[in-house]
Amino acid sequence: MLVLGFDTSTPAVTVALGRVAARGVTGAVDADILAETTEVASNRHGELLGPLIEKVLRAGGVRPAALAAVAVGTGPGPFTGLRVGIVTAKAMADALGIPAYGQPSLTLLTRADAGVATNARRKQVYWAVLRDSTIVAGPEIDLPQIAAQRFVAAGVGAVCGEGPQLYPAEFAACATMPDCEYPRAALLVASVARRAWDGAPADDLQPLYLRRPDASPPGRPKAVTPR
């Protein structure tokens, strides 16, 4: 079965197509990645995601109707970029009549046991501690030095993500892992492979923001006439 995955939780848009299958007598399920692409989008997630999906499907020689499932990173991440990915996953799943699965984006940077810290802007980071590709501490949003302290307390030896690149002094106590600055859609497809193969029900895709939006409903207007 074919699974398309994408993540828009960081400045990068990442898309991958995988063929999911059970292997050998053990029944272990994994994914062979047929095509993958990543492009740093800054604030162009909505502009880039559709063309990158088309590019990956074309590279894999696959039409959208052949997909068995879609998967998307659910954050944490900035509001606009994260919403682009989740809305696209919901729309594709509805149009194609297939399930959509979500996976925390911080689990998509590495398969190693590590700390992960991505850019939350405002001189903050989103962070989590991973063990066996599962979040065991976090996700939280904190100042970089607070996240680094959490990593040291948890015995984390190495850190992935933009965090240590943006704040090298704050993360000096932890080694920086190479080639894991942004989430990878290939890891997303692998993460949902078992659920897709088993025909698990679709997830209720909800974005994880960790920060309240800047915009808020206006309060009651002030009185302009004497009471």
Image (tube, helix red, strand yellow):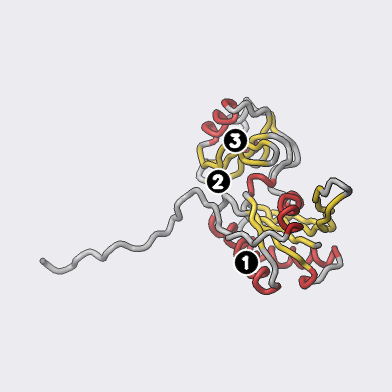
User: Mark 1–mark 3 contact, CB under 8 Å?
Assistant: no
- Mark 2 and mark 1: Cα distance apart in space: 25 Å
Tell me the residue at 62%/66% (across/down). Answer: 90
Residue that badge 2 annotates: 120
Q: Residues within 10 Å of mark 3 (few under 14, many from 20)?
A: some
Q: Tell me if 39 is positioned left or right of 150 in this view.
A: right
- Which circle, 2 or 1, is nearer the viewer? 1
Q: Residue at x 39, y 59 (%)?
A: 216
| Upstream in sequence: badge 2 or badge 1 | 1
- Residue at point 69%, 54% (across, down): 40
Q: Quadrant of the C terminus?
A: bottom left
Could you tell me the amino acid type at mark 1? Lys
Task: Return the residue nearer the eye: 148 or 170.
Answer: 148
Q: Is label 1 in a helix, a strand or a loop? A: helix
Quadrant holding the N terminus: bottom right
Q: Is residue 110 above or below residue 80?
A: above
Q: Decide: is 68 above or below 7.
A: below
Q: Residues within 10 Å of mark 2 (few under 14, many from 20)?
A: many
Secondary structure of residue under mark 2: strand
Residue type at mark 2: give it.
Answer: Ala
Residue 47's image quarter?
bottom right
To which residue does mark 1 refer?
Answer: 90
x and y percent of residue 3 in the render? 76, 61
